[in-house]
């Protein structure tokens, strides 16, 4: 799952092109967060070559100053590598942690990471800023008690569309199925079939083979207008005019809407919209977690606390155009007003009440979803 308009492959830890040395000066740092004294002492006891934090993250999923400010405050260098999807993270960690201190898994993969012992418990007593997390994101079903994760960013899967091409307001999944034009669904087997299961009145995370087959058939019957199963680049297909309507992540669509509206010379101002269909859709949460055998556990906990500082959290969400889990950042009006007022980023209570999570369904059910999706691709000619 990408959090930007461009995917890049994961990089090895030896490639430090994404590393940020400590150049930031304290007088340029907006946050009032301070590095715990015991962490500073620990860092100073390390050889200079080991004064690092290795972060494995989605691409450009942070503010410009996120890593450099933490580095300046704690006296370390934050190295960042990027991955393209959760499956890449799982596959690599199954082979043994190559040296990462922090990862950013999506809610749908957290249970598997915990079950397979690929992540380790976090000490919330060393993350006092966890108190800033919005109530609706505390104690999630995929990690009861937040024993292994703290939330980083969240968003939804919905429908982006060209208002001129569609010719009417899109409000429902039926509008997607019945549109006489070019449509792209996101190439996400469980995501798309969870939506179908929900529409069929079944558990969106069903492990039942019959339910999964029914979801496949439901989508096949309604996929006559599908011209592509997009590898999370639906926003680019929408912007180029290749597609008129796409199933995509909220932030990806909001980014092109903002860009078009801020650059009227591009000729796309007020051309696109995004909707959460009235029947309901998926809400995902990305989280910070510490892999097993992380070399700098205490530093990773400090980074989690730093990320949950209201100013730091606001800087990140103001850059990514995804929703912050930080209620204090919202209450202190640190989020850009145009973002906070956007129902794309922060759904209304009515829309939020119809959101559901796509969760880990286990190895056997995952195979059933993937097999059903392969059959769907063939039947739709994709």
Image (cartoon, helix red, strand yellow):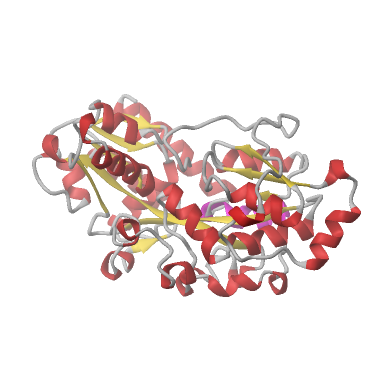
Measured from the top left, where is residue 140 in percent x and y? 53, 68
* Residue placed most toward the observer, 380 or 103: 103
Task: Where is residue 243? Give x, y as percent.
Answer: 24, 30
Q: Which residues are magenta?
A: 107-119
Residue at the spot 32% in from the left edge and 69% down from the top edge:
353
Residue drawn where x is 24% and y is 42% of the image: 261
Is residue 320 found left or right of 355 in the rendered image? right
| Figure quadrant of the C terminus | top left
Q: Is residue 38 above or below residue 214?
A: below
The quarter of the displayed image where residue 12 is located: top right
Q: Residue at 48% of width from left, 59% of height from top? A: 314
Q: Looking at this view, name the residue that lies furthest to the front.
A: 27
Above/below status of 41 relative to 234: below
Total numbered labels: 0
Q: Position of residue 317 (x, y in %)?
A: 45, 54
Instruction: Give the quarter of the image for residue 18.
Output: top right
Of 190 and 28, nearer the camera is 28
* Side of 83 where 271 appears, left or right: left
* Nearer to me, 99 or 110: 99
């Amino acid at each position: 799952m990408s959090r930007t308009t461009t995917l890049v492959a994961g990089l090895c830890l030896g490639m430090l092109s994404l590393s940020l040395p400590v150049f930031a000066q304290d007088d340029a740092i907006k946050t009032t967060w301070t590095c715990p004294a015991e962490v500073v002492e620990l860092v100073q006891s390390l050889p200079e070559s080991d004064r690092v934090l290795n972060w494995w993250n989605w691409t450009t999923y942070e503010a410009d100053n996120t890593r450099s400010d933490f580095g300046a405050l704690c006296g370390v260098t934050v190295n960042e590598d990027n991955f393209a999807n959760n499956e890449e993270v799982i596959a690599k960690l199954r082979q043994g942690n190559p040296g990462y201190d922090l990862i950013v898994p999506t809610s749908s993969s957290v249970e598997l990471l915990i079950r397979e012992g690929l992540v380790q418990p976090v000490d919330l007593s060393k993350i006092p800023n966890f108190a800033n997390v919005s109530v609706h994101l505390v104690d999630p079903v995929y990690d009861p008690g937040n024993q292994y994760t703290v939330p980083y960013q969240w968003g939804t899967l919905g429908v982006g569309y060209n208002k001129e091409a569609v010719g009417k307001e899109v409000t429902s999944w039926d509008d997607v199925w019945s549109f006489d034009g070019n449509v792209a669904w996101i190439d996400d087997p469980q995501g798309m079939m969870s939506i179908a299961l929900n529409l069929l009145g079944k558990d969106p995370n069903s492990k039942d083979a019959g339910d999964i087959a029914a979801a496949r058939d439901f989508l096949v019957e309604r996929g006559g207008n599908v011209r592509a199963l997009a590898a999370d680049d639906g926003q680019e297909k929408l912007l180029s005019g290749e597609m008129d309507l796409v199933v995509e992540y909220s932030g990806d669509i909001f980014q092109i809407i903002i860009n078009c509206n801020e650059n009227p010379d591009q000729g796309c101002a007020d051309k696109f919209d995004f909707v959460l269909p009235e029947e309901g859709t998926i809400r995902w949460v990305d989280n910070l977690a510490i892999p097993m055998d992380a070399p700098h556990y205490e530093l990773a906990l400090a980074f989690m606390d730093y990320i949950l500082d209201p100013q730091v959290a606001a800087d990140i969400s103001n850059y990514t155009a995804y929703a912050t889990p930080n209620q204090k950042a919202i209450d202190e009006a640190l989020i850009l007003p145009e973002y906070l007022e956007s129902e794309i980023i922060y759904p209304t209570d009515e829309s939020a009440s119809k959101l559901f999570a796509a969760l880990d369904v286990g190895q056997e059910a995952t195979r059933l979803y993937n097999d059903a999706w392969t059959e769907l691709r063939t039947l739709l000619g994709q």
